[in-house]
Image: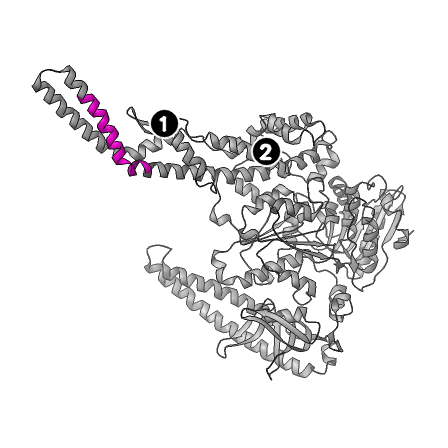
Amino acid sequence: MDAKKHPSFKKETQHLKEIREWVVKEKYSLEDYEEVLKEEITSIRKTVSHLHDERLLAKQLLSQYTERDIKNLKRAEEAPYFGRIDFQEYNRDEIEEIYIGKHGLHDKDKDLPIVVDWRAPVADIYYSGHSKDVEYRAPMGEIKGTLHLKRRYEIEKGELNAIYDEKTSEGIIEDSLKGKGDFLIEALDKNTSGRLKEIVATIQDQQNSIIRSDMLRPLVVQGVAGSGKTTIALHRMAYLIYNNRKNIENANYMVMAPNKLFLDYIADILPDLGVENVIQTTFEDWALDLIDRKINIQDKTDKLNQIFFNSNNSAIIPIIAKIKGALLFKRVIDTHMKKLELNLIPPKDIVWEGLVLLKYQQIQEVFMTSNLHLSYSQRLAKIAEYLKIKLKRDINELEEKIGELYSAKMKDIKNRILDEVQLKKNIISLYDERDLKLKRIIKEIPSIVEEYMKGSVKLDHVEFYINIFNEEKEMKRAFEDKVEDFHTIYEHMHRGLKEKRFEIDDLTALAYIKIKLLGLENSNRYTHIVVDEAQDFDEFRMSLLREFVINDSFTFVGDLSQGIYDFRGINNWSRSMERVFEGKAYHFHLLTTSYRSTIEIVNLANGVIKECKELNPVMAQPVFRHGLKPSLLKCKNQGEMIKEIVKGIEELRQNNMKSLAVICKDLTETLKVYGLLKDTIEDINLLTDDNMTFTNGTVVIPSYLSKGLEFDCAFLWNVNNEVYTMNTMDIKLLYVGITRALHRVNIYYEGNVSPILNGVHELVISN
């Protein structure tokens, strides 16, 4: 309700004023301290001989922490908290008033928390407490007590605008998840403001459970469109970093998103939650950086566009993608790796001046049984180190061999030379030569080993990958019975790689080979990895990422109904997790509530995805928020479609809907429609594979790039029977387009409407 109408308005306003005054005072204090630190750092730099001086590093670290705290205080100045719980621990008289905010605020002088961070253990009650009897897990164990009040605030620029108390009935606090909570509904009714925002004030119970799940096993979230998967995953990342902050200096975290546009769309969330230094990237950019070689990627446009418009290879492209994303392909690579492993060590004895120091069989046995967890390059370095130590350690044995060699020489001389003077002279010379050789071999052991190791195979991950396709036998054995006309497919792959023309689908294998041959830097190991739109990942990619993460600490979020790359992606979570993680236990959460769209839009989306018979899709459950039915407008031609879309955009802009998307199926149509609209509509932007900066306002975008984004209204271009057929990909692309909208969906077509929509006429308003 309006804050001024709430009975506690006066008290709450005074409390907010006091907190904001404390925040301002603390901010000024820290800003003064920051200036002192800067002066101290400048002074230390003048006296130290290098930049790694401990005093300098300590002050720089303090300066970073202070800068971070000042940023958080500036954010808190506008809205220091969003919620409050009144909690009484069992067997205690005191009822604690606990205010909860995006950032914890602590009064060091009083040693008291002023505002509790939303990620703190006690804040769990705010999200999961639905009855008066509540509990939360603290470091010292489980804490139980009574929840007397749960209150939510709407604070903007320091002003208290609204206060919501969650009602209780017979001890049960109303479940806002079901859409009965005013606070949630009002938040959902608002128009989108562009980039994705944090939701700490409106996190729901099930979302909270996912966010706070332990990080010791993989976690999979299958969520319908609009269920908040991405937001949950990013809040989970913030939660894990907060609760692992003691080890932050040694921790790496990564978010992997489907494309750069999506990365730009979500870019504000983690910084807004006070989380920095998280790597946010796409698989392609990450893999290219890891491969660390300039390679010619033949076609960087989205794979779907290649399928839509490359008529010569449109049937071959998805088959090749499926092959190169399969764990079976990984096993083919491993087979070639095993062959290479057997031939890495030079197949000869270590010989020095005619003397056999070590037999090849002995060296090979040690190499094949030692340090198997390391890369081939690291194992070669280890065997070289071992050989040097071994030869030095066995110096007595070498001395005996040299002694035996020279004893034989002396015996031969004694048999040949009768002159005692000459014999004595020659024996003394042999003794000197022997002693010199003994000294030399000790000194030359390192160079002897280095010379020997020069004969080992030179490791090149790119050449190794190309060579796999120079030999058809292993590939044929693996795929011939699974791929129709395998030889034609194989020749297509072989021809491209022979000419050193690579595809995006080659990056997984190249990255895998790179780490197996040349190793993995510790800086490339991650404490936790979030993979968004994970349904579009193939199993080989998932397996590759396992090499980089500690304790299989993953969060995979996705929706099989939006798996538009199903020719290579995941069609069954349990099957893929079983294959990739080899039976390891994992958490699985199913999110069926769609918070994004109105009931009318969700009903239409459900009607569309039901047509995907092979999927057995999960139906979305909308929150209790109504709107207009989606419109279905038949047009005489594309010129009329453009006029109707222009009219619709202008009307919605007048109604203060600013985030509007014209969604076309493919890139060619997107470019054409943008060309027709740009001179008529002001402030309209084109989003494509080449233009990946998210722009709020009106955009024209291909369907596959719109996945994960949201807009006030979606205008779907030309949904007729020729563009959107009954194949699985078209059904999913139409589902994606419809579910981008918060409030309105307008569908246009010329000719005959897509058969996908034949069964949903009662869910739309037709002309």
Q: Which residues are magenta?
A: 390-410
The dot on residue 338 is none
Kindly identify the amino acid type of the residue bearing the numbered disc 2: Val
Spot the residue most to the right.
767
Q: Is residue 671 above or below residue 296?
A: below
> Where residue 129 sits in the image (x, y, percent)?
68, 71
> Disc 1 designates what residue?
349
> Where residue 234 sits in the image (x, y, percent)?
62, 58
- Point out the image quarter for the N terminus: bottom right
> Disc 2 designates what residue?
332
Residue 393 within the magenta-colored segment of the rendering:
yes
Which residue shows up at 73% across the image and 50% down it?
A: 699
Q: Quadrant of residue 398?
A: top left
Could you tell me which secondary element the residue under label 1 belongs to?
loop
Q: Is residue 738 visible?
A: yes
Decide which of tag 2 and tag 1 comes sooner along the chain: 2
User: How many neighbours does mark 1 have within 10 angstroms: few (below 14), some (14-19), or many (20 or more)?
Assistant: some
Judge left or right: residue 679 versus residue 336: right
Q: Quadrant of residue 377?
A: top left
Q: Quadrant of residue 135?
A: bottom right
Q: Is residue 702 visible?
A: no
Judge left or right: residue 80 versus residue 405: right
Kindly identify the amino acid type of the residue bearing the numbered disc 1: Asp
> Where residue 635 sits in the image (x, y, percent)?
89, 45
Task: Measure the C-alpha gap from mark 2 to mark 1.
Answer: 31 Å
Which residue shows up at 10% across the image and 18% down it?
A: 422
Judge left or right: residue 557 versus residue 520: right
- Name the colour scheme: one colour
